[in-house]
Image (cartoon, rainbow, N blue to C red):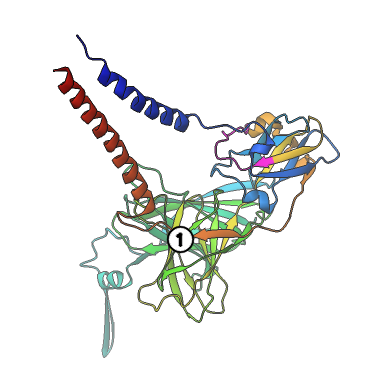
Amino acid sequence: MMNRRPLRLMLPVLGMLALAACQQDSPQAPKGPDDFALIVPVAQAQGGAVQRISLPPAALAAPRRADLGDIRLYDGKGRTLSLAFEDAGSQAARQTHAFNALPIAAPQDSDLSGVSVRIDDGERSVAVDAAEVTARTARLAVLIDTRTLTDPAESIAFKADLPAQVAVNLTVESGSDLKTWDYLGEKVLYRTGAGQALLSAARLPLNGADLRDRYLRISWQAAPGVAVNGAEVTTARQRPPERTALATRGAVLTDPHNLTFRPALAAPISAMKVSETGPDGLLPIRLFGRDAAEQPWVLLAEGTLRQNDKPALLELAGATMREYRLEADSRSAGFSSAPRLDLLLDPVTVIAALNGVEPYRLAIGNAEAKPAALPLGQVVEPAKLAALPVAQAGGNGVPPVISLAPAEPDGPFSPRKLLLWGALLLGVGVLAFAAIRLLRSNAKVE
């Protein structure tokens, strides 16, 4: 006869596991505005029901989802109203211009061993070996002819070939005479695996730079398999909207060369401004990121700090991560004190249908909320977008200060790994206890 007692002993364990699984797979979705972290009153403007609402600084920092899917609009009866996200440059007359890259340095894969130039001038002779020059400079560049552009440049997108797991830092400069160059910015491109998409968009904001009658030079450290084939420059009649800068607090140096931190912020970070706070002189820096302590650090951006100069701007362009590490060049003395960090966020504007009952409220900040925004074309016709009235979002206009917690330590003793090991050992203990009870039960039956 079948012994049912071991099965009865296992039922409570199975029940607890099933309950835990149900709790993990069935989070509590928000039911109303009170289920969100922040509520912002909205004052409807004169005009039609469809209006534009720009999020104030406090609302930019409130989302708990990186995709901003936890933004809702409620009316006075608690009904959810329709909304869509507006592209930051949709009101401007934007154009994209494609350019081929003109090489101005020897390609990495060229055979330069037999290429040299010798100049004889009577009693003197000068010989230059191209391979030696390339090896010494170890830097390649291409030229983009942007002299015909008349509108301010909003951004540049790179067309590049690069191998997997090789971080390539592209430096962009502009000049009018091919002799002197003005620095515009840097962008790190990184591909996690063969055939995989780039870690972040291959785009660098140019913030309204004037490229009329000027060239762009794109340069990078020479590496096998890396090539820049061209670029697309996006221009706009209007300058791009200003970003919101959020100050931070709590940054603590791990050592003079490293600062690790986890921003208390889920919204996408478009860039970071880094400012020296001590007498550190010229200091090259690199920014790394990762989503968990067990993952490797990935290079996101590079820059240079100069004492008593403007901050270094590190562009992220969508590579928002959970943890960051700011590294000072190992050849320097490092940071004498923790640098100041400012997080830059792109403006967020929603197009909302205010067709309910006042008062209207924006509710923001709930990690369990599922994205509910509609495509922009379903809320408003493109031809009517520019003429929409602007509703006013109230609340405190002072930008919040973002707290920085240290990143989780590497190695086997990080809190995350200890928690996972604890859960695993607990599960093993439960199974061992059940096995012992099963053996004892079978022994009694025999």
- Where does label 1 land, which residue? 406
Q: Nearer the viewer, residue 160 or 291?
A: 291
Region of the chain picked out in magenta, as a range: 363-374
State whether residue 147 appears in this view. Answer: no
Looking at the rendering, in which quadrant would you find the N terminus?
top left
The x and y percentages for residue 131 are 25, 69
Corner quadrant of residue 148: bottom right
Amino acid carrying mark 1 in the image: Pro
User: Can you give x and y, in whole percent of width and height, for residue 276 in the image?
Assistant: 52, 74
Q: Nearer the viewer, residue 335 or 23?
A: 23
SS at circle 1: loop
Residue positioned 29% across, 60% down in the render: 108
Up-down relation of residue 134 to residue 438 (above or below):
below
The extreme front residue here reads 444
- Front one among 194 and 161: 194
Q: Is residue 293 left or right of residue 35?
A: left
